[in-house]
Amino acid sequence: MPETLDKTADSAIPWWQSLLGRPWVRAMLALILILLIGCIFNANGTFFRWSAHRDMLRQSSVYGMLACGLTMVIITGGIDLGVGSVLAAVSVVYSQFMMNYGFSAWWVVIVCLIIGAVCGVWNGFLIGRFKFQAFIATLAMMTFARGFAKLAAGGRKVMNAKFFPDGTYEYNSTFPEFTEWLNSRILDRNLAIVTIIMLVCMAITYIVLSKLIWGRYIYAIGGNEEAARLSGVPVLFTKMLTYGFCGLFCAVAGISQAAQEYQGDPEAGTGYELTAIGMIVIGGTNMAGGRGGIGLTLIGVLVMGYLDKILSLNAVDESNRLMLTAAIIVIAVLYQSSRRK
């Protein structure tokens, strides 16, 4: 009898409404809408050139790396506000060791990855062991990492230069080979290395969420943490590992940011966490936790990336772009709330 009632209830819902209830369908419709807007407001045909799409992917890559870690964190029902600050701290450390001290690229990358992972694991430890609210724990990390970045940089941008006691410096136009490689393009300069790195980060996230038992734990915690705990899920370890991976992706993003800008800026990454969260929400991952995936995040990255590119091609000033982006995020969250109700 219950099966009959369920079938009757399902058949009462129009097919189009049932289809729109699927997150990936809504995300794809948003992407198609943005592409149609780009075709209409094409800036005298600039939007139809491959260079515009190539540059969009390159500009969105750092945000996409941050979004990989944040996707896992949000699925657990948490949040990480410190990703932009950790990015800045790593970019400063990378630039200091690579450009000013001339250390080996492998050692520098390992140190940077460890810094990012430790920051994330500490967040997960506070949240899982001491029951800190994710907002509070990561807000503290955001402040600490930003302060560390400014301290390590000495209050100025870390450039490929030799500084003298009188405050002057001698700029070096030759950059480390590894930095040049990170900032290069392949396939006849049509695909940036940082874009490939972003896709690798997304592939790793997909494997974790879809193929590993740890991914099941992440979804279980986001669905109902207490039920997951009673079912034997190692909540503390899972949260530490999840936030640790988020910090690891922040480190990758920080290294890529420093390579693209040829400097370590202690002010870098300001507001990046909001953009990355916006990509995740627009993609359709549920902010309440328990639902979502990296495929949806990839669509969100493309939506936000194309939106920013279209506005840039049409000479829309940054203030209006920021307000429009905020409005889109609010609409996406409101739509999610209405679907849950």
Image (cartoon, grey):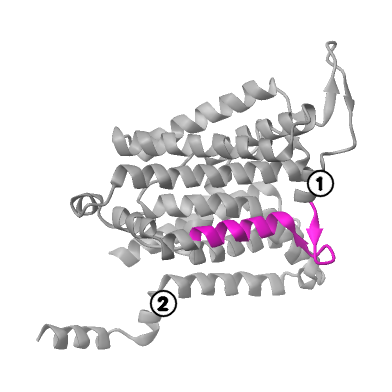
How busy is the neighbourhood of tag 2: few (under 14 within 10 Å), some, or many (20 plus)? few
Is 239 in the magenta? no
Q: Which mark is residue 20?
A: 2
| Residue in the picture at 55% in, 63% down | 298
C-alpha gap between disc 2 and disc 1: 45 Å
What residue would you read off at disc 1?
Answer: 180
Q: Which mark is residue 214?
A: none
| Residue in the picture at 22% in, 52% down | 232
Is 190 in the magenta? yes
Q: Is residue 202 above or below residue 274?
A: below
| Residue in the picture at 71% in, 60% down | 56
Residue 179 visible in this rendered orientation of the protein: yes
In the orientation shown, which residue stands out farthest toward the left?
1
**Percent x, y of residue 49:** 80, 71
Q: Quadrant of the N terminus?
A: bottom left
Amino acid type at mark 1: Glu
